[in-house]
Amino acid sequence: MRWLAVALVAVACAPAPVSPERAAELCRNEPGLADGVSGNVGVGVGSGGGKAKGSIVLTDRVFNPEDPQDAFEACVRRKVNGEPDPTRFGITIGAST
């Protein structure tokens, strides 16, 4: 009986397949991450004065960059087939004022 409970939990945690249109929507950021480097900068003004922030993200893709179109197509294929995303390792460095 325990094996049945474990099997049900494992199935419930698996990614669910989605339509190709929804997969393309979910994967729209994938090409920008294909080379392993991304970042952002933000500036704003509020009642407390000016604020600025920025960050850079480096992942293991730096050592094995992918073509952006290939990365997008692989992401869509994974989502449509209900496969999990590959494990990625990285670091985010950021600051704000």
Image: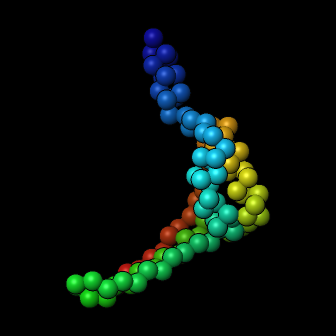
The answer to which image quadrant residue 19 occupies is: top right
Q: Position of residue 77 (x, y in %)?
A: 71, 45
Picture layout, residue 7 above or below residue 95: above
Q: Residue at x 54, y 75 (%)?
A: 39
In this rendering, would 58 be left or right of 69?
left
In this rendering, would 6 be left or right of 16?
left
Going by the picture, which residue comes out furthest to the bottom?
49
Q: Residue at x 49, y 29 (%)?
A: 12
The answer to whether residue 83 of the structure is visible from this angle is: no
Going by the picture, which residue comes out furthest to the top?
1
Q: Position of residue 28 (x, y in %)?
A: 62, 59
Of the 4 image quadrants, the one containing the C terminus is bottom left
The answer to whether residue 39 of the structure is visible from this angle is: yes
Of the 4 image quadrants, the one containing the N terminus is top left
Going by the picture, which residue comes out furthest to the front?
21
The answer to which image quadrant residue 89 occupies is: bottom right
In this rendering, would 66 be left or right of 25?
right
Q: Residue at x 61, y 36 (%)?
A: 17
Picture layout, residue 26 above or below residue 57: above
Q: Residue at x 50, y 70 (%)?
A: 92
Picture layout, residue 26 above or below residue 54: above
Which one is in front, 76 or 64?
76
Q: How many labels, in total?
A: 0
Q: Position of residue 22 (x, y in %)?
A: 59, 46
> What colouring style does the render use?
rainbow
